[in-house]
Image: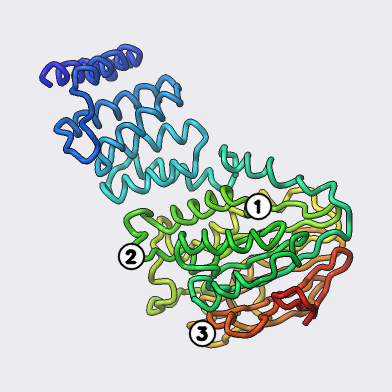
C-alpha cells in the first residue's frame, strides 16, 4: 500500500507537468500494487485509494482525449466508492467528452449533491444544461436516426392517431383500464400521451410498456408529476432534470417516441416539452411562493425559469421538414383562452403562452395540438389549429369502456370522435 501511494504521488507530479502518458503509467503501477478486489459483500480496505487512483487515471485519459479508457476508469472509481464526489466528476467529464451528455449530467449532479461547492462539477453540470437543447449527444442522434423517418413510406390512410392525457397509471383503476384496452383494435394506430402518466419511473415504465403493447407507436411528453422525486427516488436522482433525462432514456429502451417523427407519408407527430410560467393568463409575473403544487420537484436551475428551458429543448425540432397533417403535443396549456381554473394560484401553474408560439411555428396542411393538465375535456378550433385535451384523470378507469379520443382518422382531422377502449365507436 505504501508503494502504491508513492506511485500515486509520482503520477500526480506528472499531471502537474502535463506529462499525461507518464501519469497514466504511474497510476497503473499504483493500481497493480493494490490487493485484488475482495469478494462481493465484503469490505474493501483499499476502496478510497482504489477510487482515487482510478479517478486520477480517468482524468489523465481525458487530457489525452482517450474517452473510452477514461469512461472505464470513471466507472471503476464510482464503483469503488460511490460517495466520493471527485469520482463522479471524472466520470461525468469522460461522458461529456464521449458525447454522453445526458449521463454526464447525472454524475455532475451527484457530485454536487455530495460537494455542493465543487466548481468543476458545477461547471460540468452547466455545460450539460447548455448542450442538451442542441440534441447532439449520442443518445439524441440515435433516437432521431432510428425513429424520425421509419414511417415516411407508410401509405396515407393506414394509421389513426389517438390522444389521452393524465392517465395516472399508478392508480389501480387506471392500471386495470390500460390492461383492458383491446389487444387488437389499435395495433395499426398511434397514441399520444400528453403527460402525467405516473409519478415514479417504475410506474412510468409499466404504464408505457402496457400502452406500447396496445398501439403501433406511442408518443409521450412528461407532465409535472413525472418530475416529482418520490422518497424512494431521492437517492437515485439528485434533481428533477436527472429524472427527466432518465425517463427519456427509458422511452428509448421501450421504443416510445419523445422526439418528432413521421407516422405516415403525410402525417407527423411533434412532442413539445413544457412547463408553466407564472404570468399565464396575463397575471403578475411572479411565482406563488406559497404554492405546494410541485413541492416534490428539485431543480438545478431557478424554478421560475424552467419554462424557458423547456422551450429551448424544443427549438431544434421546430425546424424539421414537416408536411401534411402535423399533430403537436404538450402537457401544459399553450393558450390562456383554453378552459382552465381561473383562480390566480392555480392559473400560475397551468400553462405557458410562449408555448403557443412554438405550436404555431410548425407548418402543415392540417394542424392539431394535444395538451393535458387542465382537468377539463375540451376541443376547439382557433387560427387553423384544433386544440384538444382528452383528460382521463385519477378516477377515469372507473368508467366502463372509458374512451380514447381519435384526432386523426388517417385522412382528416377529427374533433369529436371517440372510441371505446374495447375498440367500438363511442
The residue mark sitting in front, 2 or 3, is: 2
Q: Residue at x 50, y 68 (%)?
A: 198
Relative image position of residue 56 (x, y in whole percent): 29, 26
> Which secondary structure lies at badge 3?
helix
User: Residue 29, percent across and down?
Assistant: 24, 14
> Could you classify mark 1 by the number of other residues whose Cα lies within 10 Å: few (under 14), some (14-19), or many (20 or more)?
many
Residue 387 % position (x, y):
73, 74
Q: From mark 1 to mark 3, how far is it between C-alphas?
A: 33 Å
Q: Which residue is mark 1?
A: 259
> Is residue 357 something one can see in this rendering?
no
Q: Quadrant of the N terminus?
A: top left
Which type of secondary structure does the marked residue at label 1 adopt? loop
Q: Which residue occupies 47% across, 31% down? A: 97
> Which residue is tagged 2?
231
Residue closer to the observer: 49 or 61: 49
**Pointer 2: residues within 10 angstroms few (<14), some, or many (20+)?**
few
**At x 57% / y 79%, what residue is drawn?**
393
Look at the numbered discs 2 and 3 and tell me whether their residues touch, using CB distance below 8 Å: no
Side (left or right) of 326 relative to 192:
right
Q: Is residue 216 visible?
A: yes
Q: Are marks 2 and 1 in contact (CB under 8 Å)?
A: no
Judged from the image, the secondary structure of the residue bearing numbered disc 2 is helix
Q: Is residue 80 above or below residue 108?
A: above
Badge 2 or badge 3: first in the primary sequence: 2
Q: What residue did someone put label 3 on? A: 344
Category of crowding for the residue at label 3, using alpha-carbon neighbours closer than 10 angstroms: few (below 14), some (14–19), many (at least 20) = some
Mark 1 in CB contact with mark 3 (< 8 angstroms): no
Amino acid at each position: 500500500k505504501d508503494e502504491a501511494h508513492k506511485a500515486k504521488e509520482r503520477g500526480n507530479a506528472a499531471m502537474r507537468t502535463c506529462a499525461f502518458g507518464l501519469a497514466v503509467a504511474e497510476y497503473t503501477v499504483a493500481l497493480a500494487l493494490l490487493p485484488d478486489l475482495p469478494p462481493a459483500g465484503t469490505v474493501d480496505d483499499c476502496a478510497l485509494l482504489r477510487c482515487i487512483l482510478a479517478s486520477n487515471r480517468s482524468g489523465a485519459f481525458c487530457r489525452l482525449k482517450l474517452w473510452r479508457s477514461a469512461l472505464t476508469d470513471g466507472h471503476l472509481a464510482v464503483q469503488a466508492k460511490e460517495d466520493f464526489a471527485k469520482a463522479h466528476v471524472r466520470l461525468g467529464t469522460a461522458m461529456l467528452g464521449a458525447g454522453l451528455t445526458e449521463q454526464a449530467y447525472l454524475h455532475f449532479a451527484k457530485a454536487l449533491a455530495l460537494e455542493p461547492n465543487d466548481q468543476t462539477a458545477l461547471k460540468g453540470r452547466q455545460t450539460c444544461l447548455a448542450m442538451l437543447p442542441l440534441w447532439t449527444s449520442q443518445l439524441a442522434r440515435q433516437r432521431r436516426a432510428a425513429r424520425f423517418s421509419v414511417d415516411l413510406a407508410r401509405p396515407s390512410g393506414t394509421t389513426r392517431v389517438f390522444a389521452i392525457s393524465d392517465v395516472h397509471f399508478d392508480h389501480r383503476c387506471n392500471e386495470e383500464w390500460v390492461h383492458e384496452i383491446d389487444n387488437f383494435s389499435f395495433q395499426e394506430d398511434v397514441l399520444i400521451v400528453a403527460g402525467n402518466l405516473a409519478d415514479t419511473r417504475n410506474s412510468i415504465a409499466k404504464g408505457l410498456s402496457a400502452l406500447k403493447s396496445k398501439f403501433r407507436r406511442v408518443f409521450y411528453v412528461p407532465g409535472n408529476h413525472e418530475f416529482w422525486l418520490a422518497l424512494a427516488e431521492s437517492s437515485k436522482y439528485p434533481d428533477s432534470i436527472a429524472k427527466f433525462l432518465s425517463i427519456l432514456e427509458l422511452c428509448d429502451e421501450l421504443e416510445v417516441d419523445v422526439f418528432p417523427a413521421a407516422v405516415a407519408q403525410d402525417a407527423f407527430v411533434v412532442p413539445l416539452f413544457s412547463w408553466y410560467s407564472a404570468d399565464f393568463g396575463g397575471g403578475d409575473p411572479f411565482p406563488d411562493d406559497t404554492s405546494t403544487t410541485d413541492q416534490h420537484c428539485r431543480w438545478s436551475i431557478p424554478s421560475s425559469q424552467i419554462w424557458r428551458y423547456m422551450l429551448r429543448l424544443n427549438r431544434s425540432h421546430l425546424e424539421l421538414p414537416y408536411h401534411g397533417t402535423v399533430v403537436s403535443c404538450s402537457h401544459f396549456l399553450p393558450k390562456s383562452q383554453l378552459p382552465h381554473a381561473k383562480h390566480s394560484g392555480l392559473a400560475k401553474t397551468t400553462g405557458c403562452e410562449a408555448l403557443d408560439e412554438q405550436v404555431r411555428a410548425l407548418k402543415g396542411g392540417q394542424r392539431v395540438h394535444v395538451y393535458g393538465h387542465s382537468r377539463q375535456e375540451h376541443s376547439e378550433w382557433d387560427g387553423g389549429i384544433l386544440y384538444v385535451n382528452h383528460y382521463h384523470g385519477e378516477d377515469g378507469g372507473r368508467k366502463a369502456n372509458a374512451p380514447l379520443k381519435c384526432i386523426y382518422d388517417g385522412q382528416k382531422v377529427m374533433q369529436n370522435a371517440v372510441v371505446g377502449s374495447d375498440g367500438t365507436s363511442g
